[in-house]
Image (cartoon, helix red, strand yellow):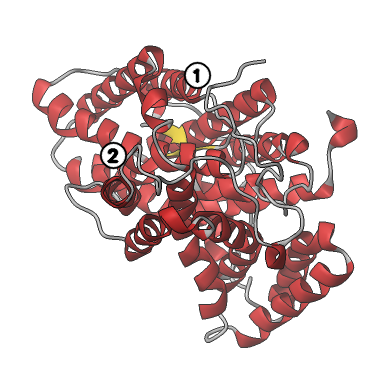
Amino acid sequence: MLGSLKLSHVVAGAVAVLVGYTGSVAIIFQAIETSGASQAQANSWMLALGLGMGLTSLALSLIYRMPILTAWSTPGAALLAVSLTDVALSDAIGAFLFCAALLILTGVTGWFAALSRLIPDALANAMLAGLLFPFGLAAFSAFQSETALVAAMAVTYVAGRRLFSRYTIPAVLAVGILWGLGDGSFAGAGPLDLSVAQPVFVMPSFSLPVLIGIGLPLYIVTMSSQNMPGVVTLKAAGYAPPVSASLVVTGLASLLLAPFGGFAFNLAAITAAIGCGPEADENPKTRYLAGVMTGVFYIIVGLGGATVISLFLIAPKALVATVAGLALLSTISNSLSAALQEPQGRDAALITFMVTVSGVGFFGIGAAFWALLVGIVVNHLISPPGSTGAPTTRDTTPCPALSGPGPFRRDQTPRKPTETTR
């Protein structure tokens, strides 16, 4: 494994952790504050979340040889931030355990894996492109506020794609950090506290209203807004993810770490796209090492507790946005190409993409779920099963204009949509 490790794997892991934390750590802090946790308990939450994401990403990537990244439930954290008011912390922990049990049950029964196989590849690619589109757009929007920084990183990206494609994103990240240090963007960082976070156990208690009002919604938003996009991301990259096994692993991690603040873990989507893309590795068979490195970095960051997280908060927002956006450009282009390549399913795929980009949500469930639901309905109405215009569900190859290493198979044989084990 070490012989196959590349700098691109390390950088992909670092960028994934950077994006994962800076994108939603503020929501986690809000949830912790709403729960009434003490400072020691807050540090324990960050420790549990970091270790949970790190260990599950590390284990799944090594066992299945795929870049399977996990994450905390961001919509779940948003739910907790508005739902834990006047709820005893012990009751909240009980709700976390209830959600974990439901996740494990879902994985054991296998119904979610069967459901995920019903999603046509064109719709999966369209939803993935829609999920990643705001990140690509943010890289260009940042040019307005941090013109010099973003311009330097963009020039590096273009030059790298021409001269040293394998190391393009590492070079972009290095230039961004050096530029930020030079113009004082990192100024204000205080002395580092190198102490290791300590776990704080909270004895759970169970209240039926809390289980129904918090535990069940936490499970629903985690499945619909996190696990579904996570499965789609891996499928769009050409992998056959072990859906049920992943749910069992993340559910067990949630069950073990809930008393310490690990409220819910799930398959990642945005950060997984970084590890699944060609920027992480030209060879899809060794991209799993990007998932391994992501797991290692998550563990290191988790051990540092809240003091380490503060480093992510002082990083220039334009730097984070630009690195993430440029790292995802290839995946966005390949996903759009595959989604719109077949004329029969193009309308449904485009609608799926637009609904995802819109960010519309109902009943606390994010746009990704509704985009897939609308796309499947439109796809069925326009090209019902058995018609000559029925959309294909085979993997597709990007058009020549987007040639180069990408996440899609280059043969035109159907991919067997079953879970794989080693």
Q: Can you identify the residue that label 2 sits on?
A: 221
How far from the left and from the top, in percent, is residue 256? 43, 18
Using residue 336 as the reference point, say whether residue 206 is left or right of it.
Answer: left
Residue type for callout 2? Val
Q: What is the quadrant of the C terminus in the image?
A: top right
Q: Examine the rendering and report whether any part of residue 133 can be seen.
A: yes
Name the outermost residue toward the front: 388
Question: Does the CB distance between marks 2 and 1 fall below 8 Å?
Answer: no
| Mark 2 crowdedness (10 Å alpha carbons): few <14, some 14-19, many ≥20 | many
How far from the left and from the top, in percent, is residue 255? 39, 19
Q: Give the mark toward the camera: 2 or 1.
A: 1
Mark 1 element type: helix
Q: Report how far apart the C-alphas of labels 2 and 1 lie in the structure.
A: 19 Å
How far from the left and from the top, in percent, is residue 111? 35, 20
Q: What is the quadrant of the N terminus in the image?
A: top right
Q: Residue 344 versus residue 263: which sits nearer the camera?
A: 344
Q: Can you identify the residue that label 1 sits on?
A: 245
Q: Earlier in the sequence, mark 2 or mark 1?
A: 2
